[in-house]
């Protein structure tokens, strides 16, 4: 073989079924990209190359024509093909590319704001006592599978998949009965998650520099979405009744609240505070995002109706999700928007591609209409209440000297306050090393950090898992508190 090709191009007729044409194309292309053949280097003629490789001239000619069309070779009548100058700069790896220093890659301000966000939390695989998880092990998967199969057989095509009326109507009936919302079905926008609903709403309502209020401590996903939209996000502290804004002089464009089960404290905003918030928003010209993320799960007393149902001015955007009441991987959330914005939100939804598959929407509609959704919520409320109580008892016994518990009236997680001398991030890292997931409280604050604590889930974990995790928490906290803490634990 000609020394020009020796060790560079070697086609095999038994190369795992890869055609000779493909082998020759790949090897010639890789050789040029590697820099072994510099620009203007002449290859053998197609006749000579075919002879050397023992393949047909038609095969060689086809490969050369393809490489010329892609810009790797220059060909002219009566001349041997030469390596094109552009071949060394193709963005496909190889030594020739590596020789050139890369120019800086620029990203948008939106991307840079996301880069600086400390959300989402990186907790690794789900294990006790990871918060924000429902128990997928007790979900009626067989029933859900039947609903999906039936929906898939009758799935629509194209635009009909956007915000299926079957799910809008079923969901609205459920929300009117159980959450007291006031809306029409066309106001419901079906999205892949509650986070996507918050993110879309923030982009639709906020301009760069607008002031947005979030609860502090509060949901980090809302803060990240608003900061990415360019807002100036300010944390508003809580009192025993939730968001406490009295005395503030700044006026927000947007207010984010979790009034039915404050995230992460679990506190309930009573009816009088809700009415005060609506009056304030109206006077300030502000919009409210109400995240009702796990309101279906309620243990003590009667749940308070949604803030949206009390709103007579169209200022409340109501966000919800199925992931806490069913299981996380269902990946479906929604937002109820004012009637005059429903069409615009659908346009934004199409533009951003945040569209749920039609079979999933129709399956959820059937799951709700046939009573399976309500039955599952009733069943899991009993189970989750028992698990909440079990975690409170287990933590009190194993770590009562180190924790102050704030048992919630509903939801799937609770907050355990730490002694101020302990750093909750360090505690969470120690627990992770010991096999227990606990989210630190301090990252939930916007601005000044007002306390140290652990955010612990109980819904997804059975009694033995809860007991073992509580014992580990007690042991780790005892070790971190020193000899005095160990003596208290033994007493």
Image (cartoon, rainbow, N blue to C red):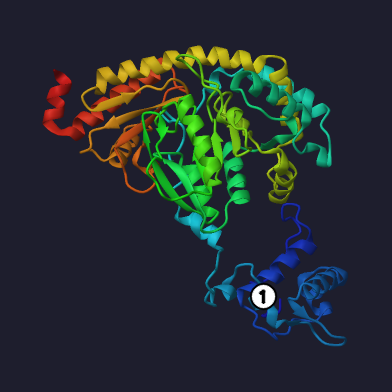
* Residue at (82% x, 41% y) in the render: 159
Mark 1 nearby-residue class (10 Å; few <14, some 14–19, many ≥20): many
Q: Which is more toward the observer, 449 or 4? A: 449
* Residue at (46% x, 45% y) in the render: 213
Give percent across and percent down for residue 485: 15, 28
Q: Is residue 84 visible?
A: yes
Tag count in the figure? 1
Q: Which quadrant holds the N terminus?
A: bottom right
* Residue at (28% x, 41% y) in the render: 426
Q: Is residue 122 visible?
A: no
Q: Quadrant of residue 342?
A: top right
SS for dot 1: helix
Q: Which quadrant holds the C terminus?
A: top left
Q: Is residue 471 left or right of residue 63?
A: left
Q: Quadrant of residue 183?
A: top right
- Vertical relation: 20 (above or below) 326: below
Give percent across and percent down for residue 66: 81, 70
Q: Which is more toward the observer, 228 or 272? A: 272
Q: Is residue 216 left or right of residue 46?
A: left
Q: Which is more toward the observer, 359 or 317? A: 317
Q: Is residue 390 left or right of residue 59?
A: left
- Vertical relation: 296 (above or below) 189: above
Give percent across and percent down for residue 148: 73, 25
Q: Which residue is mark 1?
A: 32
Give percent across and percent down for residue 173: 70, 21
- Vertical relation: 244 (above or below) 137: below
Q: Which is more toward the observer, 10 or 82? A: 82
- Vertical relation: 450 (above or below) 98: above
């Amino acid at each position: 073989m000609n020394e020009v090709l020796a060790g560079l191009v070697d086609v095999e007729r038994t190369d795992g079924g890869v055609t000779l044409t493909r082998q020759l194309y790949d090897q010639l292309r890789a050789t040029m990209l590697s820099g072994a053949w510099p620009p203007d280097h002449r290859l053998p003629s197609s006749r000579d190359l075919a002879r050397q490789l023992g393949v047909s001239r038609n095969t060689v000619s086809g490969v050369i024509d393809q490489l010329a069309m892609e810009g790797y070779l220059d060909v002219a009548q009566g001349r041997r093909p030469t390596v094109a100058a552009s071949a060394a700069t193709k963005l496909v790896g190889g030594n020739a590319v590596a020789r050139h220093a890369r120019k800086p890659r620029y990203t948008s301000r939106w991307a840079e704001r996301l880069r600086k966000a400390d959300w989402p939390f990186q907790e690794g695989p789900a294990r006790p006592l990871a918060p924000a998880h429902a128990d997928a092990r007790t979900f009626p998967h067989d029933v859900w599978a039947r609903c999906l199969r039936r929906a898939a057989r009758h799935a629509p095509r194209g635009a009909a998949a956007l915000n299926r009326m079957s799910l809008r109507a079923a969901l609205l009936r459920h929300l009117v009965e159980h959450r007291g919302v006031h809306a029409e079905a066309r106001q419901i926008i079906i999205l892949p998650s509650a986070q996507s609903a918050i993110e879309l709403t923030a982009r639709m309502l906020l301009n760069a520099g607008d002031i947005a209020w979030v609860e502090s401590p509060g949901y980090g996903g809302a803060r990240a979405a608003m900061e990415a939209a360019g807002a100036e996000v300010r944390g508003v502290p809580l009192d025993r009744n939730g968001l406490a804004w009295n005395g503030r002089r700044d006026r927000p464009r947007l207010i984010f609240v979790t009034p039915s089960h404050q995230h992460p404290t679990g506190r309930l905003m009573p009816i009088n505070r809700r009415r005060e918030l609506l009056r304030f928003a109206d006077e300030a010209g502000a919009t409210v995002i109400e995240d009702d993320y796990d309101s279906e799960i309620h243990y003590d007393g009667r749940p308070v109706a949604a803030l949206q149902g009390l709103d007579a001015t169209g200022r409340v955007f109501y966000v919800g999700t199925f992931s806490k009441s069913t299981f996380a991987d269902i990946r479906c959330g929604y937002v109820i928007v004012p009637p005059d914005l429903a069409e615009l939100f659908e346009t934004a939804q199409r533009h951003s591609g945040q569209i749920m598959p039609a079979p999933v929407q129709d399956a959820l509609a059937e799951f709700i209409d046939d009573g399976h959704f309500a039955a599952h919520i009733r069943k899991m409320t009993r189970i989750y209440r028992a698990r909440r109580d079990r975690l409170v008892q287990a933590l009190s016994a194993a770590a009562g000297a180190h924790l102050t518990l704030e048992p919630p009236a509903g939801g799937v997680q609770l907050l355990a306050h730490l002694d101020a001398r302990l750093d909750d991030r360090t505690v969470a890292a120690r627990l992770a090393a010991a096999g227990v997931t606990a989210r630190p409280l301090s990252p939930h604050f916007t601005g000044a950090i007002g306390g140290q604590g652990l955010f612990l889930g109980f819904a997804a974990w059975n009694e033995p898992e809860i007991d073992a995790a509580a014992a580990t928490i007690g042991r780790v906290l005892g070790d971190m508190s020193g000899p005095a803490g160990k003596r208290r634990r033994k007493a």
